[in-house]
Image (cartoon, coloured by chain):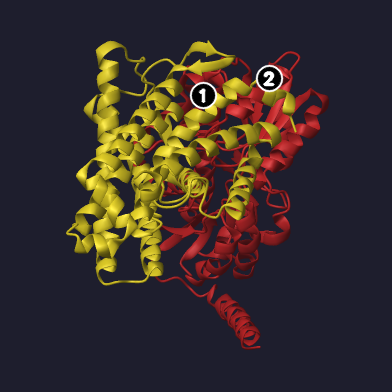
Chain colours: A red, B yellow
Amino acid sequence: MKKVSSIVSAIALALGMTVALTPAANAACTGKLKIAYQGPLTGPEAALGLNELRGVQFAVKKSGLDIEVKEVDDQGDPAVAGPIAPSVPQDECVVALVGPAYSGASRVSLPVYLSAGLPIITPSATNPTLFDFGGKIFHRAVLTDDYQGPALARLITSKVKNAKVFLINDATDYSVGLAKLVDFTLGSRIVGKETTPQGTTDFTSTIAKIKKSKANVVAYTGYFSQAAVLVKQLRDSGSKAVFAAGDGVLDQQFVKLARKAAEGALLTAPAVPLEAANAKLAKEFKKVMGVDAGVYTTESYDAANFFIAAIKKGNKDRASILNYIKKNSHKGLSKTLKFDEKGEVAGVDVNGFVIKGGKIVLTGAIK
Amino acid sequence: MDFGLLFSEFPSLTFDGIALGAIYALISLGYTLVYGVLRLINFAHSEVFMIGTFAALMASSNIMGVKIEDDPLSGGKLILTIVVCLVVAMLTSGIVAVLVEIVAYRRLRKRGATKLATLISAIGVSITLVEAFRIMTDSLPREFPRFFEKSLVAEIAGAQIRNDKLLVIFAAGLMMFVLDRFISKTRIGKGIRAVSQDEQTSVLMGININRVVTVTFLMGGLMAGAAAFFYVLVYENTSFRVGFFLGISAFTAAVLGGIGNIRGALVGGFALGLLEVYGSVLLGTAWKHVIAFTILVLVLLLKPTGLLGESIQQARV
């Protein structure tokens, strides 16, 4: 009984805190304005979060404005995001938020930001249902998962004649979901399937299966670090099957890790690498930030710049910034951000890429 | 259940499984040696391995000047590079293992702290090292240069023999042999066995327990460093979390063979490597840990001390 009552009191306390925080949201900010970034900054997914955080920091640095970037580390995990989300709008100087990076963390955070009226643009949370959680404060700078799976399938069939595809996922939510859509779209062209959980380093048995299936395409729906290990072992085994993958692999790190084995790989993403969007800016980014831009850096940069544009027009509180991004559009590097009534960007495509000469080359939108 | 593939590729899969098992075996020696002497699971051992991979990386780029985009090496430079990287990785891991013992365990040991306190200290060291490397590497994996072209050098009984894996099997086998001789023949090796048999009596007999413990950690670290170099040679990348899965697998191998038993760790390592490769062909890679751990549980149910029985001194007297 004691345990139950302590849980009840903990819940009551948590609710009390949320209620107590909400009114503070509209109080005036007396110090520096802050743009928050929320995503995984530690934990196994941190590489993606850091890509995005740097995009935001770079945009703020280039703006010349005296704005602070507030880092909110949710580790990409809803269980971590839940407890920390209420503290973000508590600081009334936080007038906008880029993120959350992941859909799961977005689900638990968005209702809190909605009640605080904090405008957000996520650069990478691609679950189609997020508007239901964030309502008017929710905006998304990329297309949802519904588009990428079929696009990857179409990219494969358009580039490879008589494609026979061996489909591999890494057992994460993102990867399984994307693989399902690829599987569904390709149907009988799938000649084999395999799950290699994250952390797998030895693909001996998977490669034996690929060879037996006589597949001429290996489609992988996981992330770049493991993809590099897989594609290298695939090439070392003598296989010439085309390697195809989604946005989890679209990262300069993939090319760096896999080197020659990455050549000819087909990739898709609702995102544009900074390198492809603006090579000169990518060089400057490397110089200023000390590391290369990664996947979703461009989208984060665009999202932050939309907020910065609003602030430059004299909008210094949450309500007026929200109003600005709803009414205006922003010509970003990846696309023009113009949000519809559900906060989604309209009229953009999933892009196809090929790795050529050690560079990720944009081949254009996938029709 | 793809039995057809398992049978048709059996020789090649066996070869790959032995190469993987050799790496597991080298790491599991560190767990088993420390357990044999201190009755402690050194959870920081996976990080000793992880640091070894980074040491090998530093040695190749900073000492030997090998760049990622370079063409594969050949001749004397190739041999020199391999030896330098191997030695640096082994020494670094060995020193780190000794430091871990001095910083995290020695004081607890002297004050007679409970095993649980030491275990928590081990986990703490492990997390500290992982997070430190996460910060230092920006959470990014690091690539390792290709020292030589990987090619099939022979086909023995239908098994496709790849040069890098063959090298790993030979070199690892040599190291295991040397370690085994060291433990059974040298004075300090006898000391290690004596302490593992009865700590108090061996102290009364004049054995310097601190020295024995330090040497034990050093040996475990050296083996983990060798495993680290072989790992990056075959898989060509590393990251701050590389130790996690490999550490668990190696720990499993140690328990499977009989923790505290050096030859048990070797048998366990090779058995686990083969089981994982066969299992992942039969049921899919996602199932490999399920298969390996189910077999571990079954073995322990039937023979709780592992395949070859616990403790160093029983293995070889």
Left or right of residue B237, residue B83 in this image:
left
- Whether pointer 1 and pointer 2 mark residues with C-beta atoms closer than 8 Å, the reply is no
The disc placed on residue A150 is none
Label 2 lies in what chain?
Answer: B
Q: Residue furthest right?
A: A188
The amino acid sitting under disc 2 is: Ser
- Observer-nearest of A285 and B156: B156
**Mark 1 residue element:** helix
Task: Give me the chain letter of mark 1.
Answer: A
Label 2: which secondary element: helix
Rendering coords of residue B99 (x, y %):
24, 53
Packing grade of label 1 (10 A; few <14, some 14-19, many >=20) is some
Q: Residue at coordinates 77% horizontally, 33% vertically from top-left? A: A183
Residue placed under numbered mark 1 in the picture: A232
B7 on left or right of B154:
right
Mark in the foreground, 1 or 2: 2
* In the image, residue B315 above or below residue A353: below
Q: Is residue A356 left or right of residue B46?
A: right
Mark 2, residue position? B8
- Image location of residue B205, percent across then percent down: 19, 60
* Quarter occupied by residue A29: bottom left
| Circle 2 Cα neighbour tier, 10 Å, few/some/many (<14 / 14–19 / ≥20) | few
* Residue nearer the viewer, A270 or B16: B16
Looking at the figure, which quarter contains the N terminus of chain B? top right
Q: Residue at x 36, y 14 (%)?
A: B71
Image location of residue A123, percent across then percent down:
57, 46
